[in-house]
Image (cartoon, grey):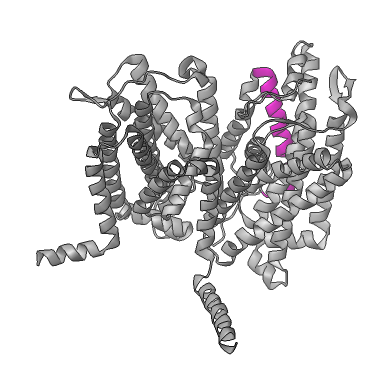
Amino acid sequence: MKTDRIKSYLKNRRNLTQIIILAFCIVFPFCNASQYVYRIAVSSVLYAILAMSLNLISGVCGQISLGHIAYYGIGAYTSALLTVNFGIPVWIGFIAAFLMAMVFGLFIAIPTLKLSGGYLSILTLSFAEVIRLILLNWTDVTRGAMGILNIPLPSFFGFELRSSNSYFIMVALVAIIIYIAMSNLINSKFGRNLKAIRDDELSSEAMGINIYRTKVIAFFVSAGIAGLAGAFYAHYMRFIDPTSFISDESTVILSMVVLGGMGNMLGSVLAAVILTVLPEVLRSFSDYRMLVYGAVLVVMMLAKVTDWKSMKRALSKMLDFRLSKEERA
Amino acid sequence: MPRNTMNHTINNIRPASVLIEVGKRKKPMEFFAQQLVNGIALGSVYALSAIGYSLVYAVLELINFTHGTMYMVGAYLFLIFVSMCSMPYWLSFILAVLLTGTLGYCIEKFTLRPIRKKKLPNFMMLICTMGVSILIQNIMLLFLGSQTRLYPTLFDGRNVAIFGANISYIQIFVVIMAIILMLLMTVFIKKSKAGMAMRATAQNSDAAELMGINVDRVVGLTFFAGAALATISGIFSCMIFRSINLSSGVVIGNKTFAATVLGGIGELKGAVLGGILIGIIETFTAGYISSNLRDIAAFIVLIIVLIVRPRGLLGKPVQKKV
């Protein structure tokens, strides 16, 4: 009886994937792979967190934000500056990064969310550019292009996360928590409101959804999580400078969301892992990295409008035609 | 004028800011006049680009991310025709405009039209233009490299001093050409049959289709015109700055958007006004505050406009259609 239940649970492809990923996260830190492999693993987990956070506003709610990297940068700088300059514990830095990114998310959400979708995209893009230029030019605080050095490692209960695999455990744990929270969120009433707004703003307003409030909360949460990811990045790399937060990175995150399927959290995670690991595996391919991200965006959009069935029919017709010709001969 | 550095960050110092540095040693009044002249020249280039942006927005309600890329593609095509094929300027100009216009048309036909036909949400077209612009930019990066190149110019950089301001002939030429083109565009949109079809499609594409207008052709034409205007603007502004860099297209795309929104999106007069205002604001910020802030200025104006008056200076209040 019990085995049947487990079998039916595993038959669902989604559940199976979740369990495989979970098992991988548990086993992987003890695999004793090289530090380089763990490094890639940490960065793909960070991208997965970012992709999930962007998915909430762009995938689930349909508000295309092209400046998501700005929150990441704000989070990284907030935590790094606080811990380096004032010597406060790193975990407080994480919380501060989360809150700071939230505040900026609110700051950008309020003027734009009353406008149509396109405005939001370009304004977030400009906003990310402004943030990057401020980080670059406000040398008294951010040290400009020289970046911030010697960012402390996080330590918990006297145990310092010195190796990449211990850091992987921490970020993977946080990513799993975020994944569970996000999956529950998008299936809650709030999540259904977001989906309604994506499908038709006007009708969802007529159905009594407070569009403005819903969008602002989504922005708030999304920006905060991106900021948290930024803080993780800063304390992992131990060095940050504005070049890590260029607007190309926002496109990278967006293409992860698009490849994974808009609104699909598990898809975002998988796409983030694939698109981070692939350029590392295919070394010669790294020159074409951005090219591939651009192609992913276009191909995924066009794949939705291509009529695969009629294409297949046409193809089989062609094959049939050729076969009959051969038969005749 | 010194050649530009290899640095390809966005806030690299362009030759125009060298002019500003020279100007700083002048008397305040002359400095002001100089800034104003530079601003108007830059602004008229932005205005040309903004008209194209505005046209596309009016017809499809789409923020077209390929616009900045078209600006760059066109400017590079001109450079390639002039310096590699050693064609005369006028011929390379016409070829660059036509080729880029065709590219714009093809982008619309092969990537946007299928999405539009299926009546899918607008953000899919947005992502599509985004992807196309990244694709084109990176293909160009592979072939052309990221270095800043010297750009051909007219009149050998001679200038004339009026009221203490050094005005180069190319600036005067660009402003005059921009005015002529803007008038031509206005006449085209108000008087010609194709322009009328464009306005009808902008108002209501379904009704326009019922009235026997070939909406697909009109949208294609709009993209052609938008890309062509972006190219003209790109060639002129590169002639003024005498240098070209692959990263310039992205910034221009954003500034053009700022100009379009400032003037009122979908309004021809608004695009011109917004373009010139953004040009002037940019040069004044660079001249009086800091040249590092010149790229931020346009964005800050954009944010303020969106908070205070989202429909822009000359825009009409928008009514949502169901």
Q: Residue at x 74, y 50 (%)?
A: B100
Vertical arrangement, residue B188 with respect to residue A250, above or below: below
Magenta-colored span: B266-289
Kindly identify the residue that appears in the image at 41 percent across and 18 percent down.
A149
The answer to if B281 sits in the magenta stretch is: yes
Q: Quadrant of residue B190?
A: bottom right
Q: Is residue A199 magenta?
A: no
For the C terminus of chain B, the quadrant is bottom right
**Residue extending furthest front?**
A329
Left/right of residue B190 with respect to residue A181 in the rendered view = right
Residue A239, percent across and down? 41, 23
For residue A152, which quarter of the picture?
top left
Place of residue A111 in the rendered image (x, y in percent of width and height, measured from the top left): 50, 39
Say whether residue A15 is visible. yes
Quadrant where the image shows the N terminus of chain B: top right
Residue A115, can we see it?
no
Residue B314 image position (x, y, % from top left): 69, 43
Q: In this view, does A121 lie to the left or right of A15?
A: right
